[in-house]
Amino acid sequence: MEEYREQPEMKREEHRLSNRSRFQRPVWWSLAALVLLLILAVSWWKPWQSGRVMLTAEAAEQSVLAQYPGGEIVNSTLKDGTYLMQLRTETGLYDVQLDAVTSTVNSIKRLESNPQAEEKTLWSREQIKTELQKQTDGELDSLELVEQQGSPVYNAILIMKDNSREQWTVDPYNGQKQSSKVLDAPAVNEPAQENNKPQFLSEKQAEQKALARVPGEVDDIELRGTNSGNPYYLVEIDLEDGREAIVQVNAISGAIRSVTWDEDED
């Protein structure tokens, strides 16, 4: 009899546990679905970026064009906080990725090259000097051909009439100024501060130093090493006997660092 009574009790307990399990299962599924929705909402909303203002499409295009003058934006798309653009310039078509908040160019990649641009010829230093004289009455202090964002440009340092120093970025194919910035404004009240900064010799001063060592006619002069902390001029001098000397002049002290001779013609 006791066994007979225990069986209904066991069945009722099993039935109660089964009902509880069936009740708890949808509750767990509901909680899991709610957590998933919260994760998706946070990922889409990105509350940690709520205080950051994104550039408009127009502002983003203007930012790129300011960094790459003369170009044209042919396509622009905003994706995950980055503007994906295609920029067409004289040298070809480029893929540009711009941070929509900081306006920083994260990457630039050339997709197509312009065959006509490949045919352009770099101007010589003398051609650039002549063209700069037409554009300014300042005195050319130095002129250096460098690579900037994958393209060659001339960096010209000019001493203006008010004794300020300006750096010009010059197109190496036509001699036109692309951009400029003031390096040293003219000192009015504190002229002694200029002594704290190393001053480069002008090209004319470097030529005089080189000619004092090797008399002749200056064929070319070039400033190098301005970013290495050890700047110097290379002065090429033609002698009357047909030989050529290359004199290396310290751009700050004017000291002659070396004299190299081309092979003598017997």
Image (cartoon, rainbow, N blue to C red):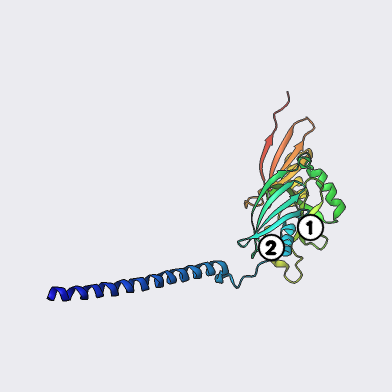
Q: Is residue 260 visible?
A: yes
Q: Secondary structure at mark 2?
A: helix
How many other residues sit within 10 Å of disc 2, few (<14), some (14-19) or many (≥20)? few
Who's the residue at 43% across and 72% down the image? 31
Q: Quadrant of residue 163?
A: bottom right
Tell whether 12 sits left or right of 152: left
Q: Is residue 233 visible?
A: no
Q: Where residue 259 sits in the image (x, y, percent)?
A: 68, 38
On residue 195, the disc is 2
Q: On the image, numbered disc 1 is attached to which residue?
A: 159
Tell whether 3 sits left or right of 188: left
User: Of the residues shown, which amino acid type is indicated by label 2?
Assistant: Asn
Who's the residue at 67% across and 36% down the image? 260
User: Of the residues shown, which amino acid type is indicated by label 1?
Assistant: Ile
What is the CA distance from the residue labelled 2 to the residue labelled 1?
17 Å
- Which quarter of the rendered picture does the N terminus lie within? bottom left
- Which quarter of the rendered picture does the C terminus lie within? top right
Q: Tell me which label, 2 or 1, sits earlier in the chain.
A: 1
Q: Nearer the viewer, residue 59 or 136?
A: 59
Q: In the displayed orientation, state which residue is furthest to the right.
A: 134
Question: Is 116 above or below relative to 105?
Answer: above
Q: Nearer the viewer, residue 90 or 82?
A: 82
Tell whether 161 sits left or right of 33: right
Q: Where residue 15 sits in the image (x, y, percent)?
A: 28, 73
Q: Where residue 102 sits in the image (x, y, percent)?
A: 64, 64
Who's the residue at 74% across and 55% down the image? 73
Q: Secondary structure at mark 1?
A: strand
On residue 250, the disc is none
Who's the residue at 69% across and 62% down the image? 195
Q: In the displayed orientation, state which residue is furthest to the top.
A: 266
